[in-house]
Amino acid sequence: MATITFDTLKFVEKLKSVGIPEDQAKVISEALRDASGEAELITKKDLQIELAPIRSDISLIKWMMGILLGGVMALLLKSFFPA
C-alpha cells in the first residue's frame, strides 16, 4: 500500500501564520499525521488486481447472456416459422 508524506513543520508554520498558538499547532499536526498514518491507501495496481476477477465474471455473464438470447431467438423463430 502507498504512504502519504506529510511535512509537519510546514503544516505547523502554516497554522501559526493564521494565529494558532505553536503548542496547539504541534498537537494538531501530530494528530493529523497519526490519523493519515492509519489510513489504508490503494494504488492503481492494487485496484486493478482487485477488479480483475470482477471483470472476468462480467465477461462470462456477457457470453452467457448472448448464448441465452440466441436460444430464445431460435425458439421464437421456430414458433413463428414451423418446419
Image (spheres, grey):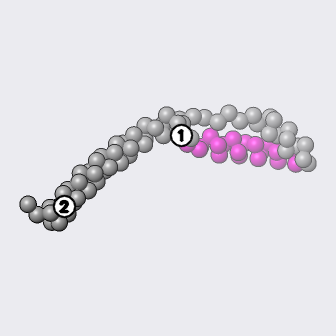
Q: Which mark is residue 77?
A: 2
Residue type at mark 1 is Ile
Secondary-structure class at tag 2: helix
| One can see residue 23 in this view | no
Please identify, in this view, whether the residue under mark 1 or under mark 2 is nearer the observer. Answer: 2
Which residue appears at 70% of the width and 45% of the height?
32
Q: Is residue 70 shown above or below 41? A: below
Which residue appears at 15% of the width and 63% of the height?
81
State which tag comes first along the sequence, 1 or 2: 1
Residue 51 image offset from top left, x and y in percent: 42, 42
Residues in magenta, as a range: 20-40
The part of the image, by quadrant, that contains residue 5 is: top right
Along the line of sight, which residue is nearer the eye, 59 or 16? 59
| One can see residue 69 in this view | yes
Which residue appears at 85% of the width and 44% of the height?
15
Q: Which residue is mark 1?
A: 42
